[in-house]
């Protein structure tokens, strides 16, 4: 039997409905702090951080329709930390280093995405700012193991030795575009507390 994109999309919708019926971590809106970074959420998002397997410290995950249909990561990483924590300690995982170049920071995010998605790629790298801190913004294309196309956008900024990451992922068909204005607003609102050495 051949799986069509519509069948995959319908499967993702059914799984999201099931996920949405589970307990949630609560709704958040307005100013939301993640480490030294603050973003402003103009609409309500569900804090579904509790759904991250082996939740890494300093990483939050938000969603509007359930994490299979859209997810927004806010991360505040120290050297040696990752966007994910694998259950098997022997499996290599991408780790942030304070001496990474801008292109290596983008590769780090892509390598983290590759732990869950297939063949992620970064495109349209461009300079940006997180508040007044220089940042790199880029777009992402990937797909699930079942073949559902996923689009994304991310921003990375380093302040002192900490890496701040904003990452949004959603199915390319409908869901990515439907929240794109809200996500752009979140990215534009991001700011960092005044720099201080730790």
Image (tube, rainbow, N blue to C red):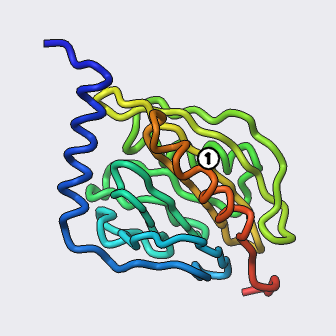
Q: Residues within 10 Å of mark 1 (few under 14, many from 20)?
A: many
- Residue at label 1? 153
Front-most of 98 and 174?
A: 174
Left or right relative to 159: residue 178: left
At horizontal 31% and vertical 52% (from top left) the residue drawn is: 90
In the rendered image, residue 135, in percent from the top left (x then y), is placed at 79, 58
Q: Is residue 145 above or below residue 5?
A: below
Quarter of the C terminus within the rendering:
bottom right
Left or right relative to 83: residue 162: right
Q: Is residue 198 above or below residue 166?
A: below
At horizontal 45% and vertical 75% (from top left) the residue drawn is: 57
Quarter where residue 159 is shown: bottom right
Q: Is residue 193 above or below residue 102?
A: below
Front-most of 21 and 113?
A: 21
Quarter of the N terminus within the rendering:
top left
At horizontal 67% and vertical 71% (from top left) the residue drawn is: 162
Which SS class for mark 1?
strand
């Amino acid at each position: 039997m051949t799986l069509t994109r519509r069948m995959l999309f319908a499967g993702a919708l059914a799984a999201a409905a099931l996920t949405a019926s589970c307990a949630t971590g609560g709704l958040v809106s307005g100013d939301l702090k993640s480490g030294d970074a603050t973003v402003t959420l103009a609409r309500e998002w569900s804090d579904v951080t509790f759904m991250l397997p082996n939740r890494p410290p300093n990483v939050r995950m938000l969603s509007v329709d359930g994490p299979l249909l859209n997810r927004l990561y806010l991360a505040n990483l120290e050297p040696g930390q990752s966007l994910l924590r694998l259950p098997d300690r022997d499996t290599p995982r991408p780790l942030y280093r304070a001496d990474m170049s801008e292109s290596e920071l983008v590769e780090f995010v892509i390598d983290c995405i590759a732990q869950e998605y297939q063949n992620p790629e970064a495109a349209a790298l461009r300079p940006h700012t997180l508040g007044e801190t220089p940042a790199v913004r880029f777009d992402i294309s990937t797909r699930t193991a079942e073949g559902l196309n996923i689009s994304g956008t991310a921003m990375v900024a380093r302040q002192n030795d900490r890496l701040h990451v904003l990452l949004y992922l959603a199915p390319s068909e409908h869901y990515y575009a439907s929240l794109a204005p809200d996500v752009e607003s979140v990215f534009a609102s991001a700011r960092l507390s005044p720099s201080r050495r730790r």
